[in-house]
Image (cartoon, rainbow, N blue to C red):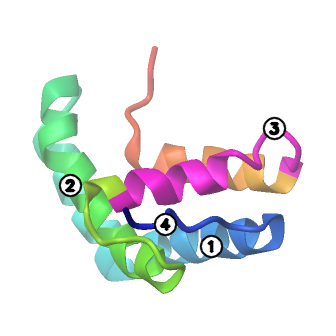
Amino acid sequence: MTQIPELSEEKALEAIKEVIAQFDLTENEEKMKVAKEEAGSDLQKMLQIVMPVAIEIQKPIAKKYGFTEDQLGLTQFTMAIKKWEATNEEIKKYGNQLKAKYMPKMN
């Protein structure tokens, strides 16, 4: 069984900043814009169209921190960062910024 990588608080902060920077690249902003426009407000389409784009954008960073470049690895990467949100306001702030980049606005 493969060991699941862990992130220290410092590495989690570093990683989430890198993820946000990756989303902020012009080409990735454009990919997300196109995907969101195609999905509209349909939650099912968001999951089918937007989430795969968001996952693709995060893959290289997850790999850099020792996670696999698949859905399981991205889930583990996300959870390794999220575990620090309860105790680190900066990580929580960046986590909220990241969610806003790919999650639909709920009314």
Describe the element under mark 1 as helix, strand or loop. helix
**Residue 51 pos. (x, y %):** 26, 48
- Mark 3 closeness class: few <14, some 14–19, many ≥20 residues within 10 Å: few
- Is 99 or 55 nearer to us in this picture? 55
* Part of the protein shown in magenta: 73-89
- Mark 2 closeness class: few <14, some 14–19, many ≥20 residues within 10 Å: some
- Residue 42 can be seen, yes or no: no
**Residue 76 pos. (x, y %):** 47, 54
Q: How far is the residue under mark 1 from the one under mark 2?
A: 19 Å
Q: Which residue is at 18% across, 57% downward?
A: 34
Task: Name the quadrant of the N terminus.
Answer: bottom left
Q: Which residue is at 83% across, 55% downward?
A: 90
Give the numbered dot on residue 6.
none
Disc 3 versus disc 4: nearer the observer = 4
The first of marks 2 and 3 along the sequence is: 2
32, above or below 48, in the image: below
50, above or below 14, in the image: above
- Mark 1 closeness class: few <14, some 14–19, many ≥20 residues within 10 Å: many
Q: In the picture, residue 26 is in which quadrant? A: bottom left
Give the numbered dot on residue 3.
4
Circle 2 is placed at which residue position? Answer: 52
Disc 1 versus disc 4: nearer the observer = 4
Circle 1 is placed at which residue position? Answer: 15
Give the numbered dot on residue 86.
3
89, above or below 21, in the image: above
Q: Which residue is at 64% across, 47% downward?
A: 82
Q: How far is the residue under mark 3 from the one under mark 1?
A: 17 Å
